[in-house]
Image: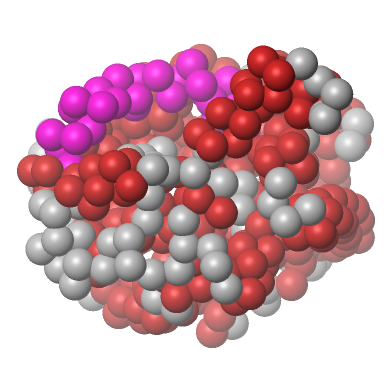
């Protein structure tokens, strides 16, 4: 949408409540949409990440690499691809950017310098992310958020319009090389034509073969999941700098999404202060465009039998620009459709308030399910079979988040994060006095 319209809607929404209701919105009410969206995002992320917990990493990026022999596997892949994959991670990143502005505004209101609040938080988050990566899961996002969030801080005071323009530029810079590579794949496809030179056909054959793990790769991956120590040794040996390299690999995308979140927060979009009509327009346009693209892409990929020349461009390269669009559409529909005070909204909001604990807690559950000191299911189940664990974990997140927050002020890991960043024990029980700042 035009940047000017983006900021004008914020001005018109100042005297409106959730999705355009004609009420004055209190601070706590304005945060409810953020919590609900964060809860939805953390549930969705687990439904995708569980593949990376349960089977070799290559299967996460190219499904036929492992555990993909049944029709049910394709059905579960298609549902996740169309509805979840990339979109809810983008939403999580957008909300992280919004939280940077929120934390800085609260620091200013408390008479503190924002950088003194922000950077200790990022330092502690980086430590959590590194421990998560080296000890538990290769697919950590926290270290990337901490490093990129340290850069995004310099933009938090900017206007919604400037932040939106910068976000679009960053996302374009990230996606342009991927789209260019997709075009290179299209050109390279002719190299395996029957009349192509033998060297070209052999090169393509080797590339296709490299997408499927060899027995030695599977054995090494299983060995790395026998214990926490084994996983740590494997990561330190095979990919020790990956958390830092993520800034180069997809840091520009993370920055663009965080800036988009800052813009969406400043404009009032994420806090439910736009009109109901505007949320409906944005939700239908963005979510509709996302569902159309990913639905058509899934159909084409299934028809092609996951041929990499079809799968790679549609699922990885051309899909990049559509994920933030889908995330914004989901955000608009959540604000529009989830009633304030409803049972679903309350449980999603509780899960969102404890997103940090739920994100890391889901990995711990995955370790217990799949690693050698748990049920030892790693590398034994197909994609559809793995996904059977998702609904029970969702139910657990929704139940325990509400139960915990009825008794405590913060999630357990949120409390640890907050206490370490402030270098003091923060109040935890509901009966304790809230700390200032």
**What's the residue at 37%, 49% (across, down)?**
56
Front residue (pair 273, 255):
255
Q: Position of residue 224 (x, y in %)?
A: 19, 45
Residue 252 is inside the magenta segment = yes
Q: Which residues are magenta?
A: 231-259
**What's the residue at 73%, 56% (across, down)?**
305
Position of 150 with respect to 304 (left or right) is left
Position of 232 with respect to 369 (left or right) is left
Q: Position of residue 204 (x, y in %)?
A: 66, 27
Please identify the quarter of the rendering in which residue 332 is found: bottom right
Q: How is the image coloured?
A: secondary structure
Q: Residue furthest bottom?
A: 343
Please identify the quarter of the rendering in which residue 250 is found: top right
Front residue (pair 129, 166):
129
Quarter of the picture holding the C terminus? top left
Quarter of the picture holding the N terminus? top right
**What's the residue at 61%, 53% (across, down)?**
85
Position of 240 with respect to 28 (left or right) is left
Q: Position of residue 211 (x, y in %)?
A: 53, 39
Q: Position of residue 86 (x, y in %)?
A: 61, 47
Secondary structure mostly taken by the magenta-highlighted segment of the chain: helix
Please determine whether, in this image, residue 206 is positioned above or below residue 49: above
Residue 1 is inside the magenta segment = no
Front residue (pair 360, 272):
360
The answer to whether one can see residue 372 in this image is yes
Please determine whether, in this image, residue 403 is positioned above or below residue 106: below
Please identify the quarter of the rendering in which residue 390 is found: bottom left
The answer to whether one can see residue 24 in this image is no
**What's the residue at 50%, 50% (across, down)?**
65
Please determine whether, in this image, residue 189 is positioned above or below residue 332: above
């Amino acid at each position: 949408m035009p940047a000017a319209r983006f900021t004008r809607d914020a001005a018109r929404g100042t005297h409106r409540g959730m999705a355009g209701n004609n009420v004055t919105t209190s601070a706590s009410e304005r945060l409810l949409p953020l919590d609900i969206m964060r809860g939805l995002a953390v549930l969705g992320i687990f439904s995708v990440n569980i593949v990376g917990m349960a089977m070799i990493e290559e299967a996460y990026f190219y499904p036929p690499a492992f555990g993909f022999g049944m029709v049910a596997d394709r059905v579960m892949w298609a549902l996740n691809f169309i509805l979840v994959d990339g979109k809810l991670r983008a939403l999580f990143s957008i909300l992280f950017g919004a939280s940077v502005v929120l934390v800085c505004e609260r620091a200013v209101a408390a008479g503190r310098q924002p950088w003194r609040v922000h950077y200790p938080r990022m330092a502690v988050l980086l430590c959590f992310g590194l421990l998560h990566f080296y000890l538990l899961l290769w697919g950590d996002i926290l270290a990337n958020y901490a490093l990129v969030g340290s850069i995004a801080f310099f933009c938090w005071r900017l206007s919604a319009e400037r932040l939106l323009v910068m976000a679009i530029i960053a996302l374009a810079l990230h996606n342009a090389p991927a789209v260019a590579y997709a075009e290179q794949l299209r050109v390279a496809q002719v190299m395996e034509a029957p009349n192509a030179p033998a060297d070209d056909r052999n090169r393509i054959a080797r590339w296709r073969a490299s997408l499927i793990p060899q027995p030695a790769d599977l054995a090494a991956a299983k060995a790395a999941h026998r214990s926490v120590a084994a996983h740590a040794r494997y990561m330190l040996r095979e990919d020790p700098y990956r958390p830092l390299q993520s800034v180069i690999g997809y840091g520009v995308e993370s920055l663009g999404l965080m800036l988009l979140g800052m813009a969406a927060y400043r404009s009032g979009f994420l806090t439910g202060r736009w009109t109901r009509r505007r949320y409906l327009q944005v939700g239908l346009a963005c979510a509709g465009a996302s569902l159309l693209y990913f639905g058509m892409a899934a159909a084409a990929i299934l028809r092609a039998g996951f041929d990499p020349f079809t799968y790679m461009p549609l699922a990885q390269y051309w899909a990049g620009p559509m994920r933030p669009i889908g995330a914004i559409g989901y955000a608009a529909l959540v604000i529009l459709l989830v009633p304030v005070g409803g049972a679903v909204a309350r449980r999603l909001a509780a899960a969102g308030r404890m997103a940090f604990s739920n994100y890391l807690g889901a990995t711990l559950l995955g370790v217990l399910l799949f690693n050698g000191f748990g049920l030892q299911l790693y590398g034994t189940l197909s994609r559809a079979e793995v996904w059977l664990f998702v609904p029970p974990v969702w139910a657990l997140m929704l139940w325990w988040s509400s139960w915990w927050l009825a008794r405590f002020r913060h999630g357990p890991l949120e409390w640890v994060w907050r206490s370490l960043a402030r270098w003091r024990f923060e109040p935890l029980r509901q009966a304790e006095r809230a700390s200032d700042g």
